[in-house]
Amino acid sequence: QVQLVESGGGLVQPGGSLRLSCAASGSIFSIYAMGWYRQAPGKQRELVAAITSGGSTNYADSVKGRFTIYRDNAKNTVYLQMNSLKPEGTAVYYCHADMTGRDTRGYWGQGTQVTVSS
């Protein structure tokens, strides 16, 4: 069974840093684009950052210059380094990946809570 498991969330003060990790496991043939989304209370889920299998990246304007997405293809893992965190970054962060297991489709992780507060 193919799944994504996130880790690294928590409570951090404004201006602080966190690194999120998302590992894909199971019978995986290929992993294509991977990304991070977030959903704040009462708001729609939004794209934070994405990375292709070749390493091309794109970011939401709100996080450019502060967040970095990267991946380790040997470990089937994607990371999100978050620096200079702001209170508006408080949300549940979800990992997403387009993968080929039994079929080719998008998969979601279970989400990890990030709270930015003093």
Image (tube, rainbow, N blue to C red):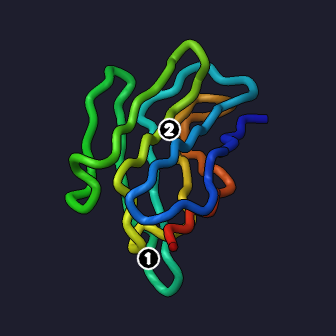
Q: Which residue is mark 1?
A: 44
Residue at the (60%, 51%) spot, across then down: 108
Q: Name the spot of residue 12 as percent of width and height, x first.
A: 54, 60
**Could you say whether the residue bearing mark 1 is in a helix, strand or loop?**
loop
Q: In the image as oriented, which residue stretches furthest toward the bottom?
A: 42
Q: How many marks?
A: 2
Q: Nearer the viewer, residue 66 or 106?
A: 66
**Which quadrant would residue 114 be assigned to in this image?**
bottom right
Residue at the (51%, 72%) spot, across then down: 117
Q: Nearer the viewer, mark 1 or mark 2?
A: 1
Q: Name the spot of residue 47 as percent of width and height, x first.
A: 37, 58
Residue at the (49%, 64%) spot, across then down: 13
Q: CA distance from mark 1 to mark 2?
A: 21 Å
Is 29 on the left or on the right of 27, as rendered?
A: left
Q: In the image as oriented, which residue stretches furthest toward the right?
A: 1
Q: Amino acid at mark 1?
A: Gln
Q: In the image as oriented, which residue stretches furthest toward the top?
A: 74
Residue at the (27%, 36%) spot, across then down: 57
Q: Is residue 55 above or below residue 17?
A: above
Q: Name the spot of residue 65 as percent of width and height, x first.
A: 22, 46
**Which quadrant would residue 53 be assigned to in this image?**
top left
Mark 1, Cα crowd under 10 Å, few <14 / some 14-19 / many 20+, is few
Q: Quadrant of the N terminus?
A: top right
Q: Earlier in the sequence, mark 1 or mark 2?
A: 1
**Which quadrant would residue 85 be assigned to in this image?**
bottom left
**Could you say whether the residue bearing mark 2 is in a helix, strand or loop?**
strand
- Say the numbered circle drawn on residue 53: none
Q: Is residue 104 above or below residue 15?
A: above
Q: Amino acid at mark 2?
A: Asp
Q: Which residue is mark 2?
A: 98
Q: Is residue 34 above or below residue 48?
A: above
